[in-house]
Amino acid sequence: MVKIAPSILSADFSKLGSEVEAIDRGGADYIHIDVMDGHFVPNITFGPPVIKCIRKSTDKVFDVHLMIENPDLYIEDFVKAGADIITVHQESSNHLHRTIQLIKSYGVKAGVSLNPATPLETIEYVLDELDMVLVMSVNPGFGGQSFIPQMKDKIRKLSVIIAERGLEVEIEVDGGIKLDNAREIADCGADVLVAGSAIFGAEDVVEETRKFKNI
Ligand code: DX5
Ligand code: ZN
């Protein structure tokens, strides 16, 4: 069954604790946490202190998506704040293999994310080191954008590569996922679907999370 990872980027930050409790109650598998630094992406969100605070609101897996430059400098801080999975961008690390080893050295899971224009070949030689590949289906930085249709082909190709190599790497897809395209994206081979505005823009966040779980 496909996993659901609501992105708190679109939550009401004035009541972040109860927003996290709502997606937990709705059956979220992962809590998707978007960290942006204003350099790698043209937007700024929050860092480890905020993550540490919401760690008290749920026991669910914290899926931390780092959209930051020089990620190696901050990995330890995110581990200490409560991250379970740390995903860095392929485009943000000059020594991706080293960054992945650093993440795993703390005993947390390691993911690599690819911007829409970044080819799958760029992770060919690190794929067997990974727990997750995060396929960006929008250009990172903002919630509420439209799914880029070419990413369906990328997800399908990645899923074939993972199967052929007999690996256990999860494919997570992030950006522009709504109730009406979620099934189709899962059928392309996605294991985890991120949804931000579709869940937190709804009247009833608990109910909307449930609907995604039931696609
Ligand atoms: C975008 C973030 C996404 C974002 C998705 O840079 O990585 O996680 O929250 O938002 P929606 O679901 O609204 O496209
Ligand atoms: Zn994200």
Image (tube, rainbow, N blue to C red):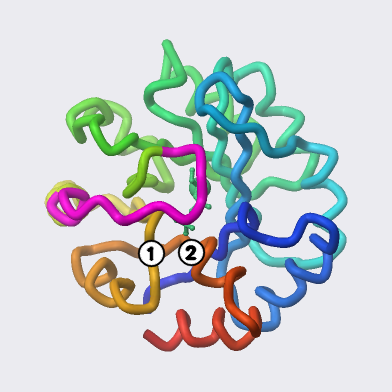
Q: Left of 158 or right of it: where is 109?
A: right
Taking the magenta stretch, the answer to whether it contains residue 147 is: yes
Please name the amino acid that badge 2 sits on. Ala
| Residue 41, label in figure | none
Decide whether the magenta segment is chiefly helix, strand or loop: loop
Q: Left of 15 or right of it: where is 148?
A: left
Please name the amino acid that badge 1 sits on. Ile
Mark 2: few/some/many CA within 10 Å (<14, 14-19, 20+): many
Q: Left of 22 or right of it: where is 100?
A: left
Residue at far top of view: 94
Is any atom of residue 172 visible in this view? no
Taking the magenta stretch, the answer to whether it contains residue 143 is: yes
**Which residue, given by chain and number where applicable, does mark 1 sit on?**
177
Q: Residue at x 55, y 82 (%)?
A: 208
Q: Which residues are magenta?
A: 140-153
- Tell me where residue 103 sits by quadrant: top right
Q: Residue 133, how many percent across, how many down?
A: 36, 45
Position of the C terminus by quadrant = bottom left
In the rendered image of this protein, does residue 52 appear above or below residue 24? above
Q: Residue 2, how many percent across, how many down?
A: 38, 73
| Residue 195, label in figure | 2
Ligand 1 neighbours mark 1 (CB distance < 8 Å): yes
Q: Residue 154, how many percent across, how many down?
A: 17, 47
Is any atom of residue 167 visible in this view? yes
In the rendered image of this protein, does residue 9 appear above or below residue 214? above
Q: Describe the element under mark 2 as helix, strand or loop.
A: strand
**Marks 2,1: beta carbons within 8 A:** yes
